[in-house]
Image (cartoon, grey):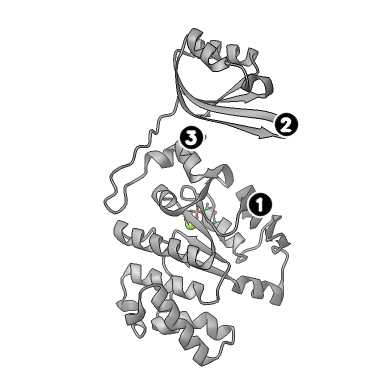
Amino acid sequence: MIKLNTIAKSYNSAPVLSGVTLEIPSNIIYGIIGKSGAGKSTLVRIMSLLESTDSGEIYFDDKRVDNLRGNALLERRRKLGMIFQNFNLFLSRNVYGNIAYPLEISGVDKAEIKGRVEELLELVGLSDKIESPISKLSGGQKQRVAIARALAVRPEILFCDEATSALDPQTTTSILTLIKNIQTQMNLTVVMITHQMEVVREICDFVSVLDEGEIVESGTVKDVFAFPRTKVAREFLGSIKPIDGDDILEIEPSLAHIYRLHFLGESTKKPVISEFIKQSPVNINILSGTIRTVGEVPIGELVVEMEGSAPNIEIAKRWLADRDVKMEALDA
Ligand SMILES: Nc1ncnc2c1ncn2[C@@H]1O[C@H](COP(=O)(O)OP(=O)(O)OP(=O)(O)O)[C@@H](O)[C@H]1O
Ligand SMILES: [Mg+2]
């Protein structure tokens, strides 16, 4: 588990991150999406301990890591893998030399390095390129080498900063599939920084939206796609592009009349909704619903689409409030 607690960072007194609080569970793929300049790369550099914070704390599995210095910091950093949009490979080294590099600086002996590099190349599907110079590889192949290099030290967390942004849609799909397979095989925690909603949709389990240095929305990918709460999330959904021939995408970007109704205690047991539908001045379409028991108290949630004039919606809201049902607009 990665925990960020009110992380703040400014450059030349201009705030870039203002109080980012986030929990990333282990063994999943967590997406962080945001527009250009939102602070994504800054956040990932801070999470991967490449850059210090102005304030706030970072914990890996409940151990504080942002205050590590010297050798302790180097040791911790070595256990983190990172890949970037522009691959950041050493052009002076061939494929073998790039993947061997982190093992060499960790003092692993030559024979073991050879075995490990061969194993990694097989994992990323590039065994036949072991001696290739980097300049002879395609973008997708370069990213595969970068992934192999990042995994060489058996990291627990892999940070990906726009890892597929420089690739065509088909290559993007193949790299995302590779990352997904590796994540499952190795029980990795993957943090995917991206500005592409299609990347989030393809492989992420959870997503947070970063906007102007703040997390404005977080949830499972399913929930955020179904009921985006913020304008910025809806804009991302609206701009989603099909990848690799994908043409079935039924996202309704305009959710102006979608509401979540919260029922608490007694109101969960009464036929409030059927009465409401019978007498209401607005048209109601039920989209989803759940009832959970928290402590001894049942809590119900119903997501509905309501069609009607603003005054009628207001009447509906008051009618529900009188019966202890809170109505929350999902397009705030
Ligand atoms: N080292 C730095 N020195 C000064 N300003 C910086 C530095 N790094 C980032 N910034 C500024 O912080 C803001 C956020 O930058 P950042 O690179 O984190 O955004 P991003 O969300 O990754 O954008 P993109 O999608 O374009 O990669 C920008 O205004 C940028 O100019
Ligand atoms: Mg960036």
- Disc 1 is placed on an element classified as strand
Mark toward the start of the polypeptide (1 vs 2): 1
Residue 103 vs 163, above or below: the answer is below
Residue 311 vs 190, above or below: the answer is above
| Disc 2 residue type (three-letter) | Glu
* x and y, in percent, of residue 238 in the image: 38, 38
The residue depicted at 52 percent of the width and 68 percent of the height is 186
| Disc 3 residue type (three-letter) | Phe
Q: Is residue 197 found left or right of 301 in the rendered image?
A: left
Residue density around tag 1, few if under 14, some if 14–19, many if 20 or more, within 10 Å: many
Labelled disc at residue 43: none
Mark toward the start of the polypeptide (3 vs 2): 3
Q: Is residue 129 found left or right of 291 in the rendered image?
A: left
- Residue on which the image places disc 3: 227
Q: Comparing marks 1 and 2, which lies closer to the viewer?
A: 2
Distance between the Cα atoms at labels 1 and 2? Answer: 39 Å
User: From the Cβ of disc 2, is ligand 1 less than 8 Å away?
Assistant: no
Labelled disc at residue 8: 1
- Residue on which the image places disc 2: 296
User: From the Cβ of disc 3, is ligand 1 less than 8 Å away?
Assistant: no
